[in-house]
Image (spheres, rainbow, N blue to C red):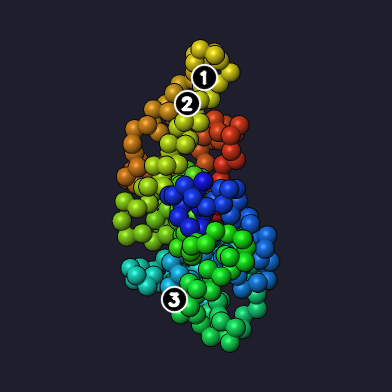
Amino acid sequence: MESAIRNCARPEGSKHGPEGEVAQFEAIHPIVSRARLAFGLLLYTGQRRGDVIRMGRQHVRAGFLQVRQEKTRAILEIPLHPALQEILAAHPAEHLTFLTTRAGEPFTAAGFTGWFRDRCREAGLPIGLSAHGLRKATCRRLAEAGCSANQIAAISGHATLREVERYTKAASQKRMAAAAMKVISGTNTGKPIGKVSQSESQLIENEGSGNETGDPGRARTCDLPLRRRLLSDNSAPHDVTSIH
């Protein structure tokens, strides 16, 4: 199965799947732990480890976390997810960075990688898991919520849409398959039950049109009412702020 923390594109990892790994980590590491703080910053901002270890309360302004990405030098303003707000509230503001070593010093990138790997092992997750996998998990969750490539990139900060489109393409296939199967569900012949509405047919056609370029003029929005109705029997939809 897909691994949420290792690599969201590979069929490896926990037998419980990607969300099972997230729940497993959270069950072992309480909200007041440094491990949970690191986990929350990675999962609910979608940023790289080098950016996460430099984040501090001075970067939180009016409900947004401001990030200057180390790799791209781009400045992002990311809305604080309610779950991340809860985690941050459980940790005192004692240092310039949210994450510190036991000595109270900021992490180095290499030091953080090794430390977080050990926290994953404590949670009983497979060897080889990494912080970078949580960045991919964020992109996957947003894509499955129906966000366009541009919307995902606005949070992740990807310089190009090619990498992001991997997630939107996979999520689109899942939604399209669910919508198509719903049309013929309950039949033995593969024929629709009753008349297929024009809106349902249009959704299937639109999803299959390959519009994954992130063109702002044609970008999909999150949580369309029609998708909610079509997919209600299979999975609960998410919105941009509810990727938990």
Measured from the top left, where is residue 132 in percent x and y? 45, 63
**Residue count near mark 3 (Cα–Cα under 10 Å), binned few <14, some 14–19, many ≥20:** some
Q: The residue under label 3 is which amino acid type? A: Ala
Residue for point 36% across, 59% down: 158
The label shown at residue 180 is 2
Q: The residue under label 1 is which amino acid type? A: Ile
**Residue count near mark 1 (Cα–Cα under 10 Å), binned few <14, some 14–19, many ≥20:** some
Residue for point 68% across, 66% down: 30
Are the residues flagged by discs 1 and 2 in contact, CB closer than 8 Å? yes
Are the residues flagged by discs 1 and 3 in contact, CB closer than 8 Å? no
Q: Is residue 37 visible?
A: no
Q: Is residue 40 left or right of residue 108?
A: right
Q: Nearer the viewer, mark 3 or mark 2?
A: 3
**Residue at the spot of label 3:** 109
Earlier-in-chain disc, 1 versus 3: 3
Residue 100 higher or lower than 73, as above or below: below
**Residue at the spot of label 1:** 184
- Mark 1–mark 3 Cα distance, whole angstroms, equals 51 Å
